[in-house]
Image (tube, rainbow, N blue to C red):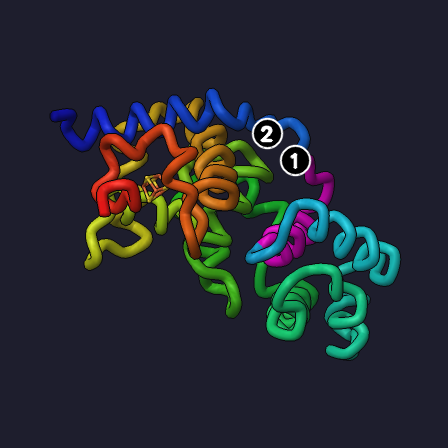
Amino acid sequence: MIDECERISMVVDKVIEMFKPDPARIQFEDPFYALVSIILSQNTSTKNVQAAMERFRRKFDSVEAVASASLKSIQEAIKPAGLWRMKAPRIKLIARQIAEGKIDLGKVLSIPYSEARRILMSLDGIGPKTADVFLMFARGEPVLPIDTHIFRVMRRLGVAREKDDYEAVRSKLESVIEPEKRILAHLALIEFGRRICTARNPKCGECPFSGICPSSRLRA
Ligand code: SF4
């Protein structure tokens, strides 16, 4: 019987080997557009995020342009992304706060993690996960953001308990996974949740963890 740390380590190494994520393909040259891209990525495939970002950038060439745009024109621009109706007001609100000088995203990238995270989360529409993903991609912060797929996978594998919140699962994984491996772990676990341990009808028959997973459908 393996303990929890070994279980996390084994799962992470295996999913990295399976999906071979390449963080270099995710590049941001502007922090505001990085933030928009992270918001668009929720419940959306990489291909559709790219399509939505292309339209968004073509339509809006500055944060001020987004801040003063109508909600309808933002929604129209990001339509290839899922939940676009809900994401547009969030993007507009964040653009407005940045345009009004409530936050300097460039500065946020150069200050210590906890301070940067606190400032980001002071913006309406930015929670701990969005702040962590932003800091991880935009400046290589060695954090391991827990998205909905990672949460589900960890619950099913018995690593996350029902009462565990975002911070509890994040610190559990970070206590086991070395800083330099966290970005790979984040990307690979999401891929695993999208392709194998899916929200509905997980493919336990194709899963390398079915022998150790308490939620495996093969045990039924
Ligand atoms: S065995 Fe099934 S439920 Fe468990 S991690 Fe694999 S796909 Fe998910």
* In magenta segment, residue 27: yes
Pinpoint residue 117: horizontal percent, then vertical percent. Answer: 44, 50
Left or right of residue 41, residue 48 in this image = right
Find ligand 1 in the image and state its quadrant. top left
* In magenta segment, residue 87: no
Q: Secondary structure at mark 1?
A: loop
Callout 2, which amino acid?
Answer: Pro
**Residue found at x 74% / y 72%:** 75
Q: Quadrant of residue 84?
A: bottom right
Q: Is mark 1 within 8 Å of ligand 1?
A: no
**Residue found at x 14% / y 28%:** 3
Q: How dense is the environment of label 1, judged by Cα within 10 Å: few (below 14), some, or many (20 and up)?
A: few
Left or right of residue 54, residue 195 in this image = left
The label shown at residue 14 is none
Q: Is residue 2 visible?
A: yes
**Residue found at x 44% / y 23%:** 180
Residue 113 higher or lower than 40, as above or below: above
Pinpoint residue 36: horizontal percent, then vertical percent. Answer: 66, 56
Seen as rendered, the residue at the extreme right is 58
- Label 1, label 2: how many angstroms apart (C-alpha)? 6 Å
Q: Which residue is mark 2?
A: 23
Pinpoint residue 82: horizontal percent, then vertical percent. Answer: 64, 63
Left or right of residue 190, residue 41 in this image = right
Dominant secondary structure (helix, strand or loop) of the stretch shown in magenta:
helix
Pointers 1 and 2 in contact (CB under 8 A)?
A: yes
Task: Give the magenta range.
Answer: 26-41
Q: Which residue is mark 1?
A: 26
Residue 5 higher or lower than 214, as above or below: above
